[in-house]
Amino acid sequence: MKHVKTNALAAAVALTLAAPLATTANAAGFIEDTKASLQLRNFYFNRDFRSTPPGAASKAEEWAQGFILRAESGYSQGVVGFGLDVYGAAGLKLHSEDDTAGTGLLPSAFGNEGPDGYSHITGTVKAKASNTVLKVGNLFPTIPIAQASDIRLLPQTYTGGALSMGEIENLDVQAGQLRQVNYRASTDRQDIGATVGGTSDRFNYLGGTYKFTEIGSTLGLWRGELDDVYEQNLVNLIQTVSLGDWALGANLAYFDTSDNGNQPLDIDHQMKSIMLSAGTGPHVFRLGYQHSDGDTAFPYLAENNPYIANYIQILDFARSDEKSWQARYDLDFAQYGIPGLKGLIRYVSGDNFTAVGGGEGKEWERDIDFTYTIQSGPLKNVALQWRNAMVRSNAATGDLDENRLIVNYTIPLM
């Protein structure tokens, strides 16, 4: 694993940007539409293992500082416009010890606090014709069957190619191939893993959404194949309705997943996910239901954010045959005289799976999440977040208490 100091990372990014900008200085739009930002993320993570096996960690605790640089050019002139994006990220260890390492913030594990820092820099070449965009290189997929995660210090990224087509009004079509992944606490490019099955050097996907604007509906159809591991189809329906002062919504997702190629596991899984919402003024109420129907857990790309109702702070409630319910309440405090403060509380309960040692499995998670964005003064736009979770489970997860304290600030560079 290669580790680079932060000042070296910044210099490399500057040189990478300078070369293409100098050679295309006369290309209208390439420079004019260029934007760049540096995100500073300070992250403290503490997880208390309430039911610790002998010889295992009693808690995981680390503190780190992240730097995330994003630079995106515009497109050159012509029928086909070309551009370049640059991405660089660095993580610095502020506190970690051998017996509390392994939070996912740093390239560390229980028994080894790891290096003092890690970093990587990469780029994306892009081309645009009309409303069709092709990107090759570093990617941050956000489609329902492949959603890169950004819930630790640095984001998860992929290497591959992605094609986005928006030539028909209300129709968005996406196709692509992911070849390698850079996990959240690593600088190494690796084959792509899954929560069920093995690893592969390619994930192919095709799909899209169509918006029926007159009735407030969006239909999504997707197919993904992790070569030699699994193939997955998704049907997704999103419905929004206005009823007086209320905004009502429903998000229904059905995944059908099966084997792809030679592997020891027999994957035959159907995931049903429903999220209902009702909002009025600063209040939003949500109810969710999820059924992970199969002989294995729900398969999805490792460290991804799966597009299911009950994937929350710690658990995904996606064990074999698990059924789970969620109740959630969101509040925007601006209407009560505290602009910039938002919060939520949610509770999810799951059962109908096999517990450790046999018998019926049961688990629940309660989350509290508050974010305050400073509205004025020298610290304007600094966001402070507290995420608290409690898990009680008779599965392998066991009982957990967790706190995450996160400070985010994004500096526009151009």
Image (tube, rainbow, N blue to C red):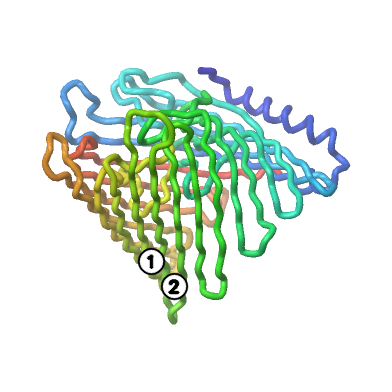
What type is the residue that disc 1 sits on?
Answer: Ser
Give the left or right position of residue 223, taking residue 6 as reference.
left
- Looking at this rendering, what residue extends furthest in the right direction? 26
Give the residue type at disc 2: Ala
Q: Secondary structure at mark 1?
A: strand
Q: Residue at x 42, y 33 (%)?
A: 229
- Distance CA(mark 1)–CA(mark 2): 8 Å
Which sits in the foreground, 150 or 241?
A: 241
Residue topped by disc 2: 247
The percent coordinates of residue 2 (x first, y second) are 54, 18
Element marked by disc 2: strand
**Nearer the observer, 40 or 304:** 304
Relative to residue 201, is residue 137 drawn left or right?
Answer: right
Which mark is on residue 277?
1
> Picture coordinates of residue 328 (x, y %)?
32, 60
- Contact (Cβ within 8 Å) of mark 1 with mark 2: yes
Mark 1 Cα shell of 10 Å, populated few (<14), some (14-19), many (≥20): some
